[in-house]
Amino acid sequence: MDGFELDVPATPENLAVFSCTGVSKDTRWEGQGGKGQRKKGRGTKGQAGKAVAEGPFPHLRCLLVTARAGRAVLGAAVDATDTGEQSLVARLVRDHPELFAGRIFLMDRNFLGYHLITAILDAGGHLIMRVKSGISLPVTEDGWLPDGSRLTYLDEPGHHRAADRLPLRVAEHNVALPGTSGEVSETYTIATTLLDHREADAETLRTAYPMRWSASETTIGENKTTVTGAGPATTPCLRSGEPGLIYQEFWAWLAATQLVRAS
């Protein structure tokens, strides 16, 4: 599961619905205030600030669920960028629980959350995910396992009772990443809902996580090339000037790239 943003044309209709990265919500476009843009801008007293025509494009927030084998798109969700990636995943779990049953999902470090993990587990799925720094994952008593991984837990927000803990297993390892002055060592913490180390040991978790690049990142990159230069920009951009048509175009775009990949 991975998210990305996609440009849409900066028409007044699109700007009234979709957000622009780096542009204040107070900005008014061509005299029309968009969602969250009802305050006064930087104009004179009592007048709205005016946006420049060269301002950034509004964006769609997109989420794809892809299968690594063949890079088939299994599911997707889309909304304005006011909606976060975790919210799009939660929407998919709620509306399409069958998508998660019996599958293991690789996720980046922005997705970890107690309620979201619990919802995916309840739907019959499992996760292997990178954990960002600052997340507390204590070692449980007798938590170290023979493969070098350890048992841990997440507390339910607002609760700290043992009965409310979500059990996880963690494998940590150092990776060498390219930097401006050569390779830089960084510790990766990989958490999983697969608690039995005999079914998926620490080395399996470490080698599984990079597969998300060959699955979601490659799929997203391939799809984007088909709309590069298609709109009023050289970057990947849809073409429709109205929000309703933007959503239609989004699903048609995914269907078309899926058909090409399948053929």
Image: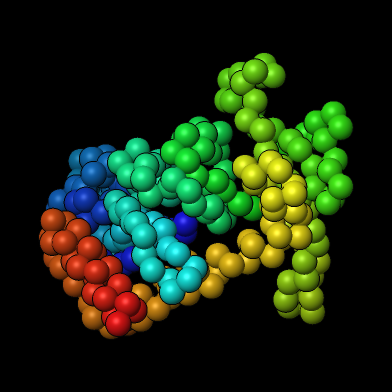
Reply above or below: 167 against 3: above
**Residue 91 at x, y percent in the picture:** 35, 42
**Residue 122 at x, y percent in the picture:** 47, 34
**Residue 133 at x, y percent in the picture:** 70, 47
Task: State the image quarter where residue 97 is shown.
Answer: top left
Quarter holding the C terminus is: bottom left
Q: Residue at x 32, y 77 (%)?
A: 262
Task: State the image quarter where residue 107 is shown.
Answer: bottom right
Q: Residue at x 19, y 47 (%)?
A: 33
Can residue 249 be seen by looking at this rendering?
yes
Q: Residue at x 30, y 41 (%)?
A: 95
Task: State the image quarter where residue 40 is shown.
Answer: top left
**Residue 206 at x, y percent in the picture:** 71, 60
Relative placement, left or right, of 155 versus 145 is: left
Closer to the camera, 232 or 47?
232
Relative placement, left or right, of 63 versus 11 is: right
Reply above or below: 61 against 26: below
Relative placement, left or right, of 125 versus 190 is: left
Q: Residue at x 38, y 49 (%)?
A: 99
Closer to the camera, 230 or 258?
258
